[in-house]
Image: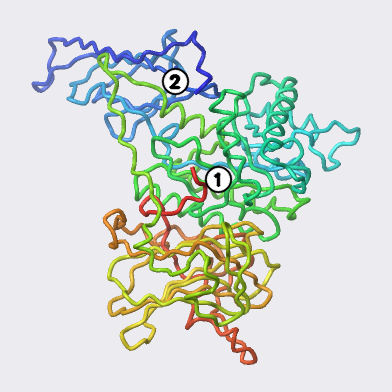
């Protein structure tokens, strides 16, 4: 990292333990007082706006606890995850802990970093893209005192005579900055409405120009030294815009500006596992289903339930991010924003279990960098470095049961029961399915679990037909004995990842995977389809099934709600698709499961997968 934390604050964390033992005893146990001094070295941390680090310290059964910084000012603390621990969050270089009236233990004085700030279970972020008609939407967060992220198109900040004309005015920008909101770079002019013929050099120049404009805008706020460290990809994550992450990485690695990370990809699972170490080159995932006329509160609150359950059952920190635009683009989403945020606060926030940390993406990224790059010493030696989780690898071709899943050979090996067309995919060819379905049979059924995954672009207008993917389970006589399906929703012109993970029931001799479009108006383009049995290869671990969605807290709704689904949702369809008797091609696979059927939460960290962004 090119920029370091101020050299005037040099942190060489050495834990100095001094224990004074007094002669008094209680029930045979020696009563003692203890004093600890901790210093934290953040010299490897890049230049940020926030440097908080949360640590957990063992204090045994001390009756009185004093925590102070190097200037002898008090540092607040809370109870830790265990009865003999405290949790301390600070951006200071020194922590002094005094303990009185304790009997001590072998763990006394042990210290460790918390995965998330204040040792929360999971994190949630929301960001607002562009600068138009955001007054009502941003008010949802302002009125609740919760900072969000503002992804700014720097040329679109104006100061016209009439207020609220659609453009986001400078006084509004200043109000958000002064309220503690995070600012991200969203280019100078949104690639001129996504129609500019930019090359990589043009994009890099645009990003750096926007950085300069944002610095000028920030100069007139209460935070003139604020560093813009995040970049939000404009115009979706289409192929022509995928050089942005590489540009940001280049800017960061060359020390050209303060930018550090990129967000803006819609990919499943929508949450991210941020167990140490965090990869700064990871493109932050964002859920768009809170945005626009198709926004649905039940989908968002259901996703929150799912992230909470997975974080607690897997004992690992998860991060869920949503984003939205102003009402000019997709309609007013103020109600969905307010309902979703209130549900989060009451259920998992300060008015509920208090397990979620709500903060903008740049604040979360900053904490993860401080967590991973700061150094803690004990008795002059560094604490043990956590062993990184194995990096997921691509599915070995020998294990992939799908033939021609990338459609490089056209429709070869795919049975057609509708209209199939080879079109441009996410990389090379893709298969467009409309008014019917296509399928492929896998004869060597296993008793282990499997992963069925791929990418879909669903860019058709609103449709009431059922559209989705699934796996049928057949016995030795070819009779279907069960299935697992997933309903798909329109997600614009980009590709979103879908997944199904299940274990076939007893008696399954073969499986049939299918891709289904319920009408001629529903145009679904598929690419990179994979199916792998977990016991195929030693590099493919067998996962412990996460909790089923039926175990999650219920989402209030008058109708059954769908599970974690790719794309921008329409109205959930809960009825089994019905064949059109006048059109045999419209016949769906045998009894596709309605969208309301419970789908187990997906946690890709337990599986191998194909990354969307090649490193």
Kindly identify which residue carries mark 1: 321
Q: Position of residue 472 (x, y in %)?
A: 42, 77
Q: Residue at x 56, y 30 (%)?
A: 260
Q: Secondary structure at mark 2?
A: loop
Cα–Cα span, label 2 and label 1: 27 Å
**Residue at the disc numbered 2:** 44
Residue 593 in view in this figure: no
Numbered disc total: 2
Front residue of 340/114: it is: 114
59 above or below 603? above
Residue 363: quarter of image: top right
In this rendering, the label closer to the viewer, 2 or 1:
2
Q: Is tag 2's residue or tag 1's residue first in the polypeptide sequence?
A: 2
Q: Is residue 502 left or right of residue 26?
A: right
User: Would you identify the image quadrant in which residue 466 lies?
Assistant: bottom right
Color scheme of the displayed model: rainbow
| Image position of 18 (left or right of 375) | left
């Amino acid at each position: 990292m090119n920029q370091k934390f101020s050299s005037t604050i040099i942190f060489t964390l050495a834990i100095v333990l001094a224990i004074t033992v007094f002669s008094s005893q209680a029930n045979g146990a020696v009563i003692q007082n203890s004093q600890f001094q901790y210093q934290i070295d953040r010299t490897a941390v890049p230049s940020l706006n926030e440097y908080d680090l949360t640590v957990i310290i063992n204090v045994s059964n001390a009756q009185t606890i004093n925590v102070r910084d190097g200037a002898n000012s008090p540092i607040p603390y809370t109870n830790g995850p265990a009865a003999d621990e405290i949790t301390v969050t600070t951006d200071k270089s020194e922590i002094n802990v005094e303990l009185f009236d304790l009997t001590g233990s072998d763990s006394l004085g042990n210290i460790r970093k918390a995965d998330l700030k204040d040792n929360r279970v999971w994190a949630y972020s929301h960001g607002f893209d562009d600068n138009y008609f955001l007054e009502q939407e941003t008010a949802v967060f302002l009125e609740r005192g919760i900072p969000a992220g503002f992804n700014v198109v720097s040329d679109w900040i104006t100061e016209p005579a009439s207020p609220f004309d659609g453009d986001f005015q400078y006084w509004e920008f200043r109000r958000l900055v002064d309220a503690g909101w995070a600012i991200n770079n969203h280019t100078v002019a949104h690639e001129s409405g996504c129609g500019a013929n930019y090359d990589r050099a043009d994009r890099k120049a645009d990003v750096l120009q926007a950085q300069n404009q944002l610095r000028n805008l920030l100069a007139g706020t209460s935070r003139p030294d604020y560093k813009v460290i995040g970049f939000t990809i404009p115009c979706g994550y289409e192929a022509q815009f995928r050089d942005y992450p590489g540009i940001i990485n280049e800017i960061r690695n060359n020390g050209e500006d303060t930018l550090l990370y990129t967000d803006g990809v819609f990919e499943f699972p929508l949450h991210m596992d941020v167990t140490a170490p965090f990869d700064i080159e990871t493109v932050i995932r964002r859920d768009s289903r809170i945005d626009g006329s198709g926004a649905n509160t039940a989908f968002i609150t259901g996703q929150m339930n799912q992230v909470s359950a997975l974080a607690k059952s897997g004992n690992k920190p998860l991060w869920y991010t949503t984003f939205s635009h102003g009402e000019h683009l997709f309609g007013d989403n103020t109600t969905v924003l307010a309902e979703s945020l209130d549900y989060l606060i009451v259920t998992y926030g300060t008015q509920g279990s208090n397990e979620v940390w709500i903060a903008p993406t740049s604040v979360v990224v900053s904490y993860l960098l401080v967590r991973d790059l700061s150094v803690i010493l004990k008795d002059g030696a560094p604490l043990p470095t956590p062993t990184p989780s194995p990096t997921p690898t691509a599915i070995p071709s020998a294990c992939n049961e799908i033939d021609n899943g990338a459609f490089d050979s056209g429709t070869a090996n795919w049975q057609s029961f509708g209209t199939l067309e080879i079109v441009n995919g996410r990389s090379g060819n893709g298969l467009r399915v409309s008014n019917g379905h296509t399928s492929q049979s896998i004869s060597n059924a296993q008793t282990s679990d499997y992963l069925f995954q791929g990418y879909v672009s669903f860019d058709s207008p609103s449709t009431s037909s059922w559209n989705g993917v699934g796996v049928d389970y057949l016995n030795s006589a070819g009779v279907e004995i069960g299935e697992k399906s997933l309903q798909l929703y329109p997600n614009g012109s980009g590709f979103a990842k879908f997944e199904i993970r299940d274990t076939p029931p007893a008696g399954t001799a073969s499986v049939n995977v299918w891709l289904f479009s319920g009408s001629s108006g529903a145009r679904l383009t598929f690419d990179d389809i994979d199916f792998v049995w977990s016991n195929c290869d030693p590099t493919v671990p067998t996962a412990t099934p996460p909790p089923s969605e039926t175990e999650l807290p219920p989402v209030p709704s008058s109708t059954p709600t769908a599970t974690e689904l790719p794309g921008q949702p329409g109205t959930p369809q809960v009825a089994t698709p019905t064949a059109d008797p006048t059109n045999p091609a419209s016949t769906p696979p045998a009894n596709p499961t309605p969208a309301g059927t419970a789908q187990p939460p997906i946690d890709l960290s337990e599986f191998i997968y194909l990354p969307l962004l090649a490193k």
